Image (cartoon, rainbow, N blue to C red):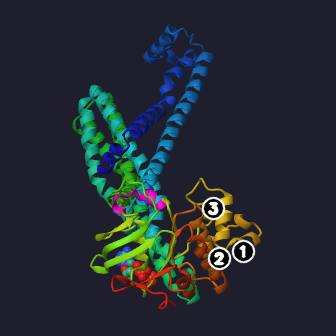
């Protein structure tokens, strides 16, 4: 019920829409041939004589009052027209339900995606990609289905209420008895709903784990295959998939048990009621018929409500898991502290920066000057904090004390998005999108053109190999750029960073996968670019170190400027 309440609070308008649509659909369903029976009885009245019945007469008079002659032809037309009308109403109402469910899935997906993209880098780093993909694909879908079941439960509850109120006027004793028996029935079978909820929750957890593990395995499948270790991963994936099947079986079992038990229990209760009414209390047959009619209608609706509630219980954990993910990301949102527009005319300074990951101190007192239009290289042993330094420069992480200053202004006071628009970034692991080279270069910058991409490819020393490909810039690079060599991927990544003509170029090991010739081309490019562009590159490659104007060595949480002679 908490989920039902939450859905309605989160999507009040949509819930109201769906509720009205479902009630209309319910009424339209109710308008089956039985509701048209009086009309049929008028139509066949002359031969069957039922036109003389009270209801038949009433309908005949009603038709005459609105100016319709109740002949056989007109009545048959009304019956067929009524059926078409009912079909139309059902179509519109159910379409509205379907559209709303799709909208809810989209809203939940967008909410999570937006929250994630706005979260702090350190938070983002800790999220398993597979479980995020699972949230957006399967959990959002299941959660939206849960929404539909919720509103259906609500609509059925309204129908029970309306029916019970009407029934009270017919026989309050029979109605009360039906409600008491119905509540008893709901209570007895509730354990099946709870078991379904547990099975649904288990499925949600298992699916998350499975997809998180699957995406890890898939991203390292080559090395696992090469070492014949993929069977271990296969065994784990198999085990998780089998557990998932078990949980699904449990859900199916509980659902079918509820379906199977409702009817016989209802029959047993009705039979006992009949026995009591006819034999023990000796009520008259019409009274008993009325009681049975009300009992079966009310209990039928209550049973339907419970089945829907069970379906909701199977799906609701997906909604809560999704919501938890989105709330976690929102709580870790990047704080936009600064508003000042950045300029880069003098340079960038790291001023007495102290930084640690939890208890691990990375920088004690880091001081680096990066004058504008220079090429700075940073070296240091593995784990010294080179990538962390680059994260600090982009504002992806913040120092615990000290400052990163751009033209003397603390990055804390600068509008981070504007600052990042001025940056070209080439990361250590070049992962390209499964798309064309052109789109890989223009990604995220819709204002850029193919000419910008060509210029950037030339600057990155990649134009020769790209233009030689059969589809040139329109060549698709494969999953994570797998159809290109490591060096080619690296040059595409450099072109991507140069396409929007940044003011500050950051490169993390930019030539680690390049042959000496390509590396030389890149180094020359960087030297040329540094006439109008500020560049910092983390590298161990002698060619980069030699090409740089200034070199810093990171060690023991500090930076030491190396003189030209010490350089490699
Ligand atoms: N998000 C993080 N949370 C906790 N510790 C981290 C995190 N990122 C990096 N570290 C740790 O901080 C230290 C510095 O990491 P960093 O990646 O900056 O080093 P690096 O000098 O770039 O190393 P390499 O040359 O191996 O790439 C490492 O010991 C690493 O384990």
Q: Main secondary structure of the magenta part?
A: helix
Query: Looking at the picture, does residue 19 appear above or below residue 239?
Result: above
Query: Looking at the picture, does residue 188 appear above or below residue 243?
Result: above
- Circle 3 residue: 439
Q: Nearer the viewer, mark 3 or mark 1?
A: 1
Residue 544 within the magenta-colored segment of the rendering: no
- Circle 2 residue: 488
Q: Who is closer to the viewer here, 411 or 192?
A: 411
- Circle 1 residue: 465
Residue at 50% across / 25% down in the picture? 37
N-terminal of the pair, mark 2 or mark 3, is 3
Q: Residues within 10 Å of mark 2 (few under 14, many from 20)?
A: some
Residue at 47% across / 35% down in the picture? 25
Residue at 26% across / 51% down in the picture? 187
Q: Secondary structure at mark 3?
A: helix
Cα distance between the residues tagged 2 and 3: 15 Å
Q: Answer yes or no: do the residues labelled 3 and 1 have beta carbons within 8 Å?
A: no
N-terminal of the pair, mark 3 or mark 1, is 3
Q: Who is closer to the viewer here, 461 or 531?
A: 531
Q: Secondary structure at mark 1?
A: helix
Q: Which residues are magenta?
A: 410-420
Cα distance between the residues tagged 2 and 1: 8 Å
């Amino acid at each position: 019920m908490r989920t039902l309440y939450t859905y309605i609070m989160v999507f009040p308008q949509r819930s109201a829409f769906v509720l009205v649509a479902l009630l209309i659909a319910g009424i339209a369903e109710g308008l089956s041939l039985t509701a048209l029976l009086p009309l049929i009885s008028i139509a066949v009245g002359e031969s069957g004589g039922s036109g003389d019945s009270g209801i038949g007469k009433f309908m005949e008079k009603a038709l005459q009052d609105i100016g319709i002659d109740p002949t056989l032809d007109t009545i048959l037309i009304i019956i067929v027209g009524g059926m078409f009308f009912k079909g139309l109403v059902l179509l519109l109402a159910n379409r509205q339900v379907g559209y709303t469910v799709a909208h809810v899935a989209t809203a939940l997906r967008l909410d999570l995606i937006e929250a994630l993209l706005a979260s702090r880098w350190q938070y983002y780093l800790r999220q398993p990609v597979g479980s995020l993909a699972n949230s957006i694909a399967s959990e959002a879908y299941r959660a939206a289905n849960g929404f539909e079941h919720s509103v259906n439960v609500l609509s059925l509850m309204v129908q029970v209420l309306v029916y019970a109120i009407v029934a009270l006027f017919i026989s309050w004793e029979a109605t009360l008895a039906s409600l008491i028996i119905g509540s008893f029935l709901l209570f007895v079978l509730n354990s099946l709903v709870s078991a379904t909820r547990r099975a649904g929750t288990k499925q949600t957890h298992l699916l998350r784990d499975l997809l998180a593990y699957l995406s890890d395995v898939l991203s390292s499948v080559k090395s696992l295959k090469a070492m014949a270790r993929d069977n271990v991963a296969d065994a784990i994936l198999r085990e998780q998939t089998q557990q998932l099947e078990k949980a699904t079986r449990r859900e199916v079992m509980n659902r079918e048990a509820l379906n199977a038990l409702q009817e016989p229990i209802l029959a047993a209760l009705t039979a006992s009621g009949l026995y009591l009414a006819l034999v023990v209390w000796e009520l008259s047959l019409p009274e008993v018929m009325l009681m049975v009619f009300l009992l079966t209608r009310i209990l039928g609706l209550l049973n339907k409500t419970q089945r829907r509630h069970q379906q909701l219980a199977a799906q609701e954990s997906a909604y809560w898991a999704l919501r938890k993910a989105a709330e976690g990301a929102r709580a870790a949102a990047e704080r936009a502290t600064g508003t000042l527009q950045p300029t880069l005319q003098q340079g960038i300074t790291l001023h007495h920066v102290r930084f640690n990951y939890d208890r691990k101190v990375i920088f004690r007192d880091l001081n680096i000057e990066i004058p504008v239009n220079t090429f700075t290289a940073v070296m240091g042993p593995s784990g010294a904090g080179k990538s962390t330094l680059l994260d600090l420069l982009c504002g992806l992480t913040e120092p615990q004390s000290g400052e990163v200053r751009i033209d003397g202004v603390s990055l804390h006071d600068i509008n981070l998005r504007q600052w990042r628009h001025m940056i070209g970034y080439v990361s250590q692991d070049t992962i390209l999108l499964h798309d064309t080279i052109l789109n890989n270069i223009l990604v995220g910058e819709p204002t850029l053109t193919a000419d910008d991409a060509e210029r950037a490819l030339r600057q990155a020393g990649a134009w020769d190999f790209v233009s030689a490909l059969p589809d040139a810039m329109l060549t698709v690079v494969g999953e994570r750029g797998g159809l290109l060599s490591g060096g080619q991927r690296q040059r595409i990544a450099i072109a991507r960073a140069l396409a929007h003509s940044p003011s500050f170029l950051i490169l993390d090991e930019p030539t680690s996968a390049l042959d000496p010739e390509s590396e030389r081309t890149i180094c020359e490019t960087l030297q040329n670019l540094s006439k109008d562009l500020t560049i910092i590159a983390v590298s161990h490659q002698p060619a980069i170190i030699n090409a740089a104007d200034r070199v810093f060595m990171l060690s023991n949480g500090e930076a030491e400027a190396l003189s030209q002679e010490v350089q490699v």
